[in-house]
Image: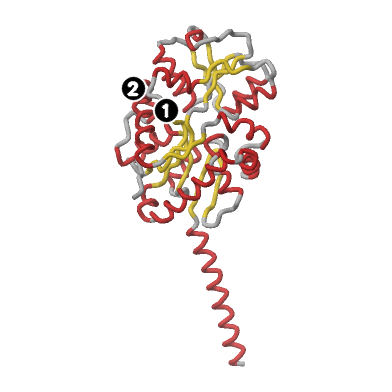
Amino acid sequence: MKKKTITLTVVMLCLCLILGCGSAFAEDAVRVYTLNGTTGFGMAGLIADAKPGYSFTVESDPSVVTAALVSGDCDIAALPTNAAAALYNKTGGKVQVLALNTRGVLYLVTDGREKIESISDLNGKTVYAPAQNPSFIFAALCSKYGIELNIDTSYAQPAELNAAVAAGQVSLAVLPEPMVTVAKSQNQDLVVALDLTAEWDKVMEPGSLVQGCVVVRREFAEQNPDAVKAFLADYEASVRLLSEDAETAAQKIEAAGIFAKAAVAAKAIPNCNVCFVTGADMQRDLGAFLEIMFEQVPQSIGGKLPGDDFYCILK
């Protein structure tokens, strides 16, 4: 009897150790949130390949991601650049930017009812744009050109505006890729009238239009520097796939739940300007963008410029 009791105790201890180890691994996983659409494209390889050591959540609303960062439920996240700066200001510097992941992806599309050959043709027009980052950037650009127009954000999300454009309910709209590709596939009358990145570079610091980034909670970065470095290495490889093999990357984008159709994603990737920029280059480009936004639309970044400690530059 004693022998059986000892054996059972050993088995129970082993089970507890196994379960305990399982819980430890779950707790040690880096919790990563990302957005669907272009901001999340670079994360697709990591998600689809089920890279060990990470847990991933894909969201459509940036406010859900920022809430998870504030609550501590998220360690690393992909966000619009203006949202990252606003969150830094709101939390007193509790988030830092690790890398830039998306440059300019905005385009002005028209169904032909409005003849737009240059940005000056927008004077006096009503142009629909998704709320937050796209509308802020478009407002800053038009202000710099001295254009007076009405920017309508009643279709708050890009997918909502895309549906309205595709259905012919809106004739002038600012859309990000891959929504431009989706809309054009559904409405043959649509054309891209303006590449807003090209228009930006004519009057702003060239290369300073950066729309997406990856941020980290400062506390997590300070306590887990090796995990952050490992993530950046894995993330860079995931981003690289988009330029090396767009078809495979598109399949992973669909598999990861970041975009519904791989074929559309593959077609859109060349126009999505996905990038991986860290260190001093990151600070230079994002700093220039935030200065422009602060000058033109200060509320878009939380009312003030982030300090130098906003930039997490790993040694």
Q: Which residue is mark 1?
A: 207
Q: Position of residue 85 (x, y in %)?
A: 38, 35
The span from disc 1 to disc 2 (Cα, nearest Å) is: 17 Å
Q: Going by the image, does 285 lie left or right of 105?
A: left
The answer to whether residue 301 is above or below residue 95 is: above
Q: Position of residue 71 (x, y in %)?
A: 44, 46
Residue farthest front in this picture? 244
Q: Identify the residue at image location x=49%, y=64%.
A: 24
Q: Position of residue 153 (x, y in %)?
A: 52, 21
**SS assignment at label 1:** loop
Q: Identify the residue at image location x=63%, y=21%.
A: 164
Quarter of the figure that contains the N terminus:
bottom right
Q: Identify the residue at image location x=38%, y=32%.
A: 285
Q: Going by the image, does 272 lie left or right of 313?
A: right
**SS assignment at label 2:** helix
Q: Which residue is mark 2?
A: 295
Which of the two labelled residues, at mark 1 and mark 2, occupies the earlier sequence position?
1
The answer to whether residue 130 is above or below residue 276 is: above
